[in-house]
Amino acid sequence: MSVPPPAPGGQQPVGQPDPYGPPPGGQSQQQYGQPGQYGQPQGQPGQYGPPPGQFPPGGQPGFPPAPPAPPKRSKAKGLIMGGLGAIVVVVLVIVGIVSFMKSPATSQAGDCLTITEFTQGGDDPAKADCNDPKANVKIAKKLDKASEDCPGGTGAGYDTYSVSGRSSYKLCLMINAKQGDCLANFTSQTKGYLKVPCTDPTKDGELVKVVTGQADKSVCEDTDATRVAVYPEPATTMCVKTNE
């Protein structure tokens, strides 16, 4: 059997067995297209990275996968908080407007108020509907200065509420009640009038006669009134029977 001469450079023809046998150690030379020490078949992972044209998942050839992108921050929370802040400001403005509208500073003659204490440290009066049972006084006249006197001077029956300072004014007040009404705190020097049933044991005043258009205590002579409240403006006389 003749042996073909070796190919140039000492390489064996492709696909032919080595006529001289395997190299020392029992390992044979690798043939083209078979797994070997320095190459991998196409499509299989190898010691030195994937075959050309294939990348590992999520990254570039020869590099570890890229870390996941950080989550995007949302401005929704800040917007909500900002919105709540705006709402709070609006509410405060509305409350301030409502409080100002109920203030006696915006009142005029003919308006009614609720007063719980006729003292310097008492609750400020608040405007109220004249038909409200808590509306215990009516403004007879509003003066531009706290130092001014109400009509009729000290002899008239007005209660007063005064404010001094930049917004100086005085309110001349008459009882907001009609003939037949009964009151508690009528004889008190500081507490506001309180409308009560005439059977209420706290009652200390009953309006037995009310005359409009006249400011004259003589109109009470034919009654059992023990006190008379005379208001020159608007002219009104109230005849009151007390528990005295």
Image (cartoon, helix red, strand yellow):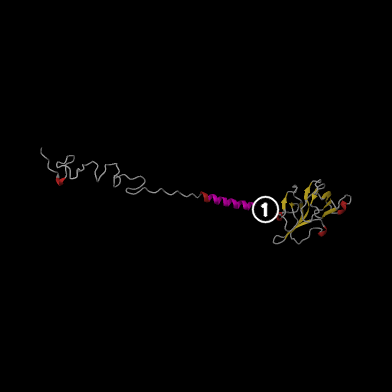
Give SS at disc 1.
helix
Q: Is-magenta flag for residue 67?
A: no
- Report the residue marked by disc 1: 99
The residue shown at (14%, 45%) is 8
Residue ranking furthest to the front: 25
Q: Position of residue 201 (x, y in %)?
A: 81, 48
Q: Which one is nearer the viewer's eye here, 130 or 46? A: 46
Residue ranking furthest to the right: 222
Residue 242 in view here: no
Quarter where residue 30 is shown:
top left
Q: Which residues are magenta?
A: 79-101
Indicate the amino acid at tag 1.
Ser
The residue shown at (88%, 53%) is 218
Residue ranking furthest to the left: 2
Q: Is-magenta flag for residue 93?
A: yes
Give left or right: position of 91 versus 148. Answer: left
Above or below residue 168? Residue 85 is above
The residue shown at (86%, 54%) is 217
Residue 95 in view here: yes
For label 1, the crowd category at 10 Å Cα-Cα, with few meaning under 14, some 14 to 19 and many 20 or more, is few
Q: Position of residue 132 (x, y in %)?
A: 74, 47
Q: Position of residue 189 (x, y in %)?
A: 79, 56
User: What kind of secondary structure does the magenta stretch mostly adopt?
Assistant: helix
Q: Which one is nearer the viewer's eye here, 219 or 116? A: 116
